[in-house]
Amino acid sequence: MKLLFINESPLVLAGGAYHTTEIWTRIPLFLAEFAERVTLLAPVRPPKDDAFSATHWPIPAGTIGIEGLGDYRSYAGYYRLWPWRRRSWSRQVERLVADHDLVILRFPSPIAPIVVSWARRLKKPLVCFLCGDLATQVDGLVQSRGLKKLFYRLAVDFFLRQERACCS
């Protein structure tokens, strides 16, 4: 079985090797022992400095395939790139979904509408991991007041509706 994992936590590409701080990445690494092929689709960024090595652990080379989405770390970063990258992301997701037997998507995820639409079009099974509560984890919403809080609330409500639509 060929598995496609979509994870929004950025990987760091340094010295030809990928590194991460995200414990969730261990799931595809574990399943790679039993699956024909496992591919991880995630944002990839260069290291800011050499200090990353103390907090990041390397992903063993050759265990899983890695496809980069670009350098973004948040919904805001994703939507800043969206006007220029939307078509290339859609083609990349279409190709990957077509090549795999099962799509596993971690929520919350700004790329979810693209992934879900291609999984549905190509009739591929989709597994959604709901990791966290977007409404209570957005620091900007929790710490702001007035109009800023209203704008954050509207954005969070939009993304929650998007998640519900994708997962139903």
Image (spheres, grey):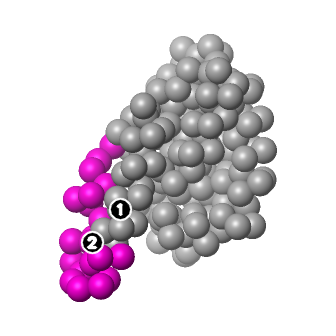
Which type of secondary structure does the marked residue at label 2 adopt? Answer: helix
Q: Residues within 10 Å of mark 1 (few under 14, many from 20)?
A: some
**Amino acid at pointer 1:** Val
Name the residue nearer the viewer: 10 or 107: 107
The residue that appears at 21% across and 83% down in the rendered structure is: 145
The residue that appears at 77% across and 35% down in the rendered structure is: 95
Q: Position of residue 110 (x, y in %)?
A: 51, 54
Q: Position of residue 168 (x, y in %)?
A: 42, 31
Q: Position of residue 13 (x, y in %)?
A: 63, 58
Q: Is residue 51 magenta?
A: no
Query: Left of 128 or right of it: where is 137?
Result: left
Question: In which quadrant of the rendered view does residue 167 lie?
Answer: top left
Which type of secondary structure does the marked residue at label 1 adopt? Answer: helix
Report the residue marked by disc 1.
156
In the displayed structure, 58 sits above or below 126; it is: below
Question: In which quadrant of the rendered view does residue 143 lie?
Answer: bottom left
The residue that appears at 56% across and 74% down in the rendered structure is: 48
- Cβ–Cβ under 8 Å for marks 1 and 2: yes
Visible residue check, residue 112: yes
Name the residue nearer the viewer: 122 or 62: 122
Q: Position of residue 54 (x, y in %)?
A: 42, 62
Which segment did they paint magenta?
A: 131-151
Visible residue check, residue 2: no
Report the residue marked by disc 2.
141
